[in-house]
Amino acid sequence: MPERDSARPAEILRTEHLRKVYGTGNNEIIAVNDAGISVAQGEFVAIVGSSGSGKSTLMHMLGGVDRPTSGRVFIEDEDIYRMDDDKLAIFRRRQVGLIYQFYNLIPVLTVEENLTLPCELDGREPDPELVQELAGMLGLKRVLNRLPNQLSGGQQQRVAIGRALITRPAILLADEPTGNLDTRAGNEIMELLKVSNRRYRQTVIMITHNLELAKQADRVLSIEDGYVSEGYLGVAG
């Protein structure tokens, strides 16, 4: 694995006064409140918080999935929410890799077809060498022709990781990527995320409620009641 440079790499993501509010008046819920985050290229950052803390809402805004009530998100110095919905969808498909807890694989597509789906949606031919490289790294070479229902949960999450990496995105966002797996499979997924971070210099932002997983990242942020801070809380549920 390549050694990390001692100098801090260039910033790849930052937010300015990021805020998300649901409802109005007495029903108003502030999910994320004045969040200012900076992430360097190639960094592995964990954002930890309890259920209902706002961590998934934050991830969706970082990934261009959910527009903020106010504030800004910059990815590679691009103010993503100044884009219209069509341009934002293209940007998200090309520059943001998303991994969810429940895999979100297409059940009628094979493993290989699921892996290359983002390229197909973007009208681009998948790079066959990258497909084989990812399949090897993820331990999927022997199951490329299988359907998702023929795989274990851990294997399905491996496919989801490969699908997120296939476009060589600027940022990989993982929302509770081990939450639906047993301990052994969860540890394997964490190792794969760390390998992708090291081997491909892939910037990874992982949302989790698990402090032990969070401590494996380069840096930990906490979110509680919508507020983001450096470091981790003593208790997460």
Image: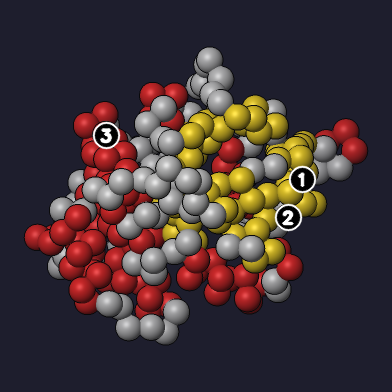
Mark linked to residue 17: 1
Mark linked to residue 7: none
From the top left corner, tell me how far across and down residue 227 is, in percent. Answer: 70, 32
For the question of whether residue 158 can be seen, the reply is yes
Query: Which is nearer the eye, 135 or 111?
Result: 135
Dot placed on the residue nearer the N-terminal end, 3 or 2: 2
Task: Bin the neighbour count of mark 3 within 10 Å (Cα to Cα): few under 14, some 14-19, many 20 and up.
Answer: some
Query: Regarding mark 1 in the picture, which secondary structure is present there?
Result: strand
Residue at the extreme front of the image, as rendered: 6
Nearer to us: label 1 or label 3: 1
Mark linked to residue 72: 2
Q: Give the residue type that dot 2 points to.
A: Arg
In the rendered image, the vertical position of residue 109 relative to residue 209, given as above or below = below
211 relative to 147 in the view: left or right: right
* Residue appearing at x 13%, y 61% in the figure: 141
* Residue appearing at x 56%, y 20% in the figure: 233
From the top left corner, tell me how far across and down residue 3 is, in percent. Answer: 31, 46
Task: Bin the neighbour count of mark 2 within 10 Å (Cα to Cα): few under 14, some 14-19, many 20 and up.
Answer: many
* Residue appearing at x 37%, y 54% in the figure: 201
Task: Bin the neighbour count of mark 1 within 10 Å (Cα to Cα): few under 14, some 14-19, many 20 and up.
Answer: some
Q: Give the residue type that dot 3 points to.
A: Asn
For label 3, the residue is 187
